[in-house]
Image (cartoon, rainbow, N blue to C red):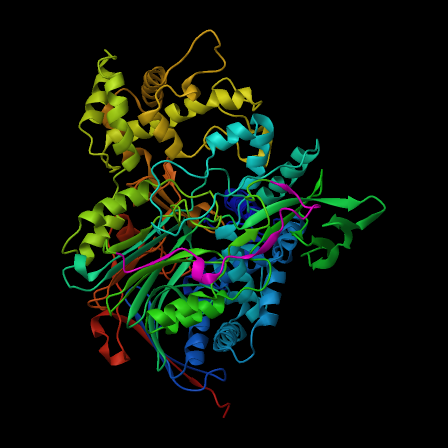
Amino acid sequence: MAAMRPPLIKTILSLFFTIVLVVVLAIPLGPLPALGPLLSPVGGLWSAARDGSFRAEEHVGFVGVAGTVEIVRDQYGVPHIFAQSDTDAAFALGWLHARERLAQMDLQRRSAAGTLSELVGPAAVEDDQFMRDIGLRRGAQATFAAMDENDPALAAMYAYAAGVNAYLEKIAPNSLPLEYKLLGVRSVAEWTVLDELTFAKFMAWDLSSSFDDLYITTLTEKMGAQKVAELFPFDRPYESPIAPVWPPNENVTSVGLPSSNQLQSAMADVLARAASAGQLRHPGDWRGSNNWAVSGARTASGKPILASDPHLGYQLPSLWYAAHVVTPNQNVYGVTLVGLPFVVIGHTRNLAWGLTNTQADVMDFFTEKINPEAENEYWHDGKWESVQAVDEVIHVRGGADVHHEVKITAHGPILTQKGLTVAMQWTGSGATFEARALYNVNHAEDYTAFVAALRDFQVPAQNWAYADTAGNIAIWSAGKYPIRKSGDGRAIADGSTGERDWTGFIPFEDVPHVLNPESGYILSANQRPAPRNYPYFLGWQWDPSYRARRIEQALAAGKGLRVADMQALQFDVKDTLAESLLPVMLPIVSGKTTDATGSAALAELSKWDYGMSVDSSAATIWVRWLDIFRRTTWADEWKAAGFAFNDKGDELKDWGAWGFNGDNEYQPPLELWEWMVREKPDAPYFDDVSTPGKAETRDDLIRASFAEALQSLTDDYGQDIAGWRWGDHHKLEVNHLLDVGVLNRGGQPIPGDGNSPNGQSSGPTSGGGPSWRMVVDLGDIANSFGVYPGGQSGSPLGAHYDDMIGLWVEGKYIPMVFPSKPEDIDASIIESGIIIEHDRGE
């Protein structure tokens, strides 16, 4: 997941910090307030130092709690909440979230609901219109309407909202967080349960939305269905499914495409709108994560160990907020999402769980046939049907309200404004019950209760790794997966016929899952969830299998494993793609270079252990060589299909929002290319189709790409190989969610790449990867640890804004302190204490 950075606000605030040094302090800057007051020692930027600050001891009263709540904050600012009821605990967590992360919470709900215009004015209207089309708020409303009023999860959400509002009621306008000072905002709207459900929908959208169907449609039109089937196969070489076996089944059929000269315009329109709203995931973007569990047969304690590290975009304030909640009904520690009252990844007294994205195909696009005589009718399954029209009112700061009409067909909202009419169908559009699932997971005491809770977890589909103190390990790919009447849904389909419609969803009992395998371990790293004979179609967009390979190497060989071994594996930087291909590629270039730089580069590669460590020059050489060799393999095919390139061979951005550019083409999966390099050296795709008089081979491309890589590295970093160290050119990037320079952090050399367990993006900076590392010892719950690249506080001037980044960079952790009562906490680690009591108003 990419960090949430609303494009408009990012632009405004970046401009603000550029001009602050040269403008007259008393002059207002468009939507920003006059700068003089911002620099005032009273109520100005300096008051941000107080944002979320805590005294050593506090005693407060609120009418929203029934009993006494005691909160003990440890040295990292992690609250340990001891309450007499679940609702009082949820109230306290909402109050804490608001106190430490108010601006983040507000911006998140506005991004999700399409209400940014209320903060920043007319320039955000188009982005809000796109989010209204997507309809996350409508989906949240449907969920709210479908929830039982006696549902304890709903009660917790009401209590959480009450805690947020209790904070809002007492905060003075000049004490609002820094982000509001920059925007000139002096009040924050009331928090509601609908806000919580809308934010939950946003997280589901961010982790399950995919516009790959539009790219595949274009590639099919330009290259032909047969070539696309060859280059983007459903079954890749070297796959290792999460659930390794399943009963036999029939093959999945392929999909047909509508034909229209307006199709390209329609697809470009959707993608341009998505890009403008910050909702476009470019081709090849990774959303990788790891989780695994080992049984007691492989551990020193004889009890399982579970590890989880979801790979998301880094941001400040962090996406995560660690918390520990103790009530008579639960004792749970883990990370929460600010805006929701539940632990998303963590452990209880008896069990632990971690999540990775299944990356299943749960979104389809359909062209709709509109009645030329009635624009609000469309042809579907043999008859004209009425379009559902929704009047979305967008309130605009400094301007008049905007009425935006959303049109919805049987397939979902219409997203196009140009070209053909295209509707989007997504599993998260209606009522879904992830809140109830998380509540029940937080309260589960055993495997049976845990699995029962997962029945309600529908979107985003996730691989839930599980372990418990009874000795069980398991993994469930829980989620809502569509069953299609025909086809596979990976390209735009003709919606008028009804032939590609969804007919239902995979029964929960049939989703991929494994319990206590003979191997003694389970794992997922976003690879294929089920084997080829699985009876249902799940998708085709899985991550490359290299992280999974390395994790399996370590787990399969592991005996007497301890927590430290699992921590080391989370920080492991071995690139298994390099391990697979370099022994093939090196002999082809060895002895073919005579200059000193080339000889030094070969020497580095020859002794390399395939580790993407910060002091490795070989790692830098490998990444550059890999990128050029891979691109060279496919570039001629893309040129022949009509995609434009510049003189450097980089694809031009003619497609704008399509995301085709020199750094991130929509290339065939790495495993297919790996298989060609290893086992099909005579594959026709190695031949450059632009040179018909010459037949290039795999070896020609290997030699040419190596020479180009050396020249490129020399141009960038000089001839001295010592200056090519990976850490010198691969730095951490943790930006504030508004991407304002002075609020950003990072710059440290960072090991790893996208093909190693410590999955980092492989460019000059790494802005995404392990967003929360957690290792839980089911033999001794107190011997559990976690860390994320940020801090608990949302205040840039607060002590806990970024205090875990250094630990995270070094592969270190903080203890997940797990007391049953306040007096069990070591006094030396207590930073502050808070007592919340019921205010009787006397």
The quadrant in which residue 718 appears is top left
Left or right, 433 with reference to 424: left
Numbered range of the magenta stretch: 492-517
Q: Residue at x 34, y 71 (%)?
A: 332
The residue nearer to you, when weighing 819 against 217, is 217
Residue 40 visible to the viewer: no
Classify 592 as above or below 620. Answer: above
The quadrant in which residue 654 appears is top right
Q: Residue furthest top?
A: 693
Q: Position of residue 357 (x, y in %)?
A: 42, 52
The residue nearer to you, when weighing 358 against 794, is 358
Q: Residue furthest bottom?
A: 842
> Is 513 colored magenta in this rendering?
yes
The quadrant in which residue 625 appears is top left
Q: Position of residue 70 (x, y in %)?
A: 35, 80
Classify 159 as above or below 629. Answer: below
Left or right, 127 with reference to 836: right
Q: Position of residue 133 (x, y in %)?
A: 65, 52
Classify 332 as above or below 585. Answer: below
The residue nearer to you, when weighing 739 against 489, is 489
Q: Residue at x 25, y 37 (%)?
A: 614
